[in-house]
Amino acid sequence: LDFEQQNGAKRKHDNVAAGGEVLKAGDHIYLWCSVGTYQHHGIVLKADECDDNESILIAEFTNTALVGLGTDMIHLSSHGSAAVSQGVTGGFRIIEEDKPSKWHKVKYEANPIEALTWRAGTCSVATPDSVRQILYRVQFLYQCCHLIPDYHVLASNCETVAVWCITGKYESLQGSH
């Protein structure tokens, strides 16, 4: 799987998150759910920016209870082509999001004041690994999704998987807040 952006050429539109950040491959992102009561996390795999098409490809760890709710999954072949299917395999799925502006970017290398005052799950003092390492971890999970622990609301959820992809540590930003 080749998740990295193809080139750095200037394009008409950028994939901009809700906070105004331009999204790129390897970013840890989150979405507020149920009127801001909790977050859903993912990793940007690819950000397409061309003419009138703005979209991001996101890897996310999802509660397998979502199977059957009619959510479309995009599975990538080794050649980068995508096929849409139904269901969640091992709690891991890849989705295409055509409204990147509803997502927020998690801030890494935050200063201690930000880490204490920002809402839990939105920033970390941790240093992210390289984009290449992050995308290798996502690819590993894609190929070995049977190794992802069963979903648990506190100990094994979309955030803990995203943090592992970014830092190599299987932990929650919210639990450390």
Image: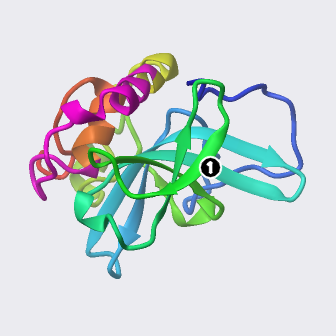
Q: Which of the 4 image quadrants contains residue 17?
A: bottom right
Q: Is residue 5 left or right of residue 110?
A: right
Q: Secondary structure at mark 1?
A: strand
Residue 102 vs 116, above or below: the answer is: below
| Residue denoted by label 1 | 56
- Across and down, in percent, residue 41 comes to 36, 52
Q: Is residue 77 visible?
A: yes
Question: What kind of colouring is applied to the model shown?
Answer: rainbow
Q: Residue at x 54, y 66 (%)?
A: 102
The part of the chain drawn in magenta is 136-158
- Camera-nearest residue between 150 and 163: 150
Residue at the image position 39 percent from the left and 58 percent from the top: 87
**56 to 4, vertically: above or below:** below
Looking at the picture, how far across and down is residue 129, in whole percent?
39, 20
The stretch drawn in magenta includes residue 145:
yes
Q: Is residue 125 visible?
A: no
Q: Is 23 one of the magenta-colored residues?
A: no
Q: Position of residue 55 (x, y in %)?
A: 68, 53
Q: Which three-letter amino acid code belongs to the residue tagged 1?
A: Ile
Measured along the vertical axis of the image, is residue 109 above or below residue 90?
A: above
Q: Residue at x 11, y 54 (%)?
A: 152
Q: Is residue 21 above or below residue 131?
A: below
Q: Quadrant of the N terminus?
A: top right
Image check: 129 left or right of 152? Answer: right
Kindly indicate the quadrant of the structure image that contains residue 9.
top right
> Crowding at label 1, few (<14), some or many (≥20) Cα neighbours within 10 Å?
many
In the rendering, at what x and y percent does residue 44 appear? 52, 42
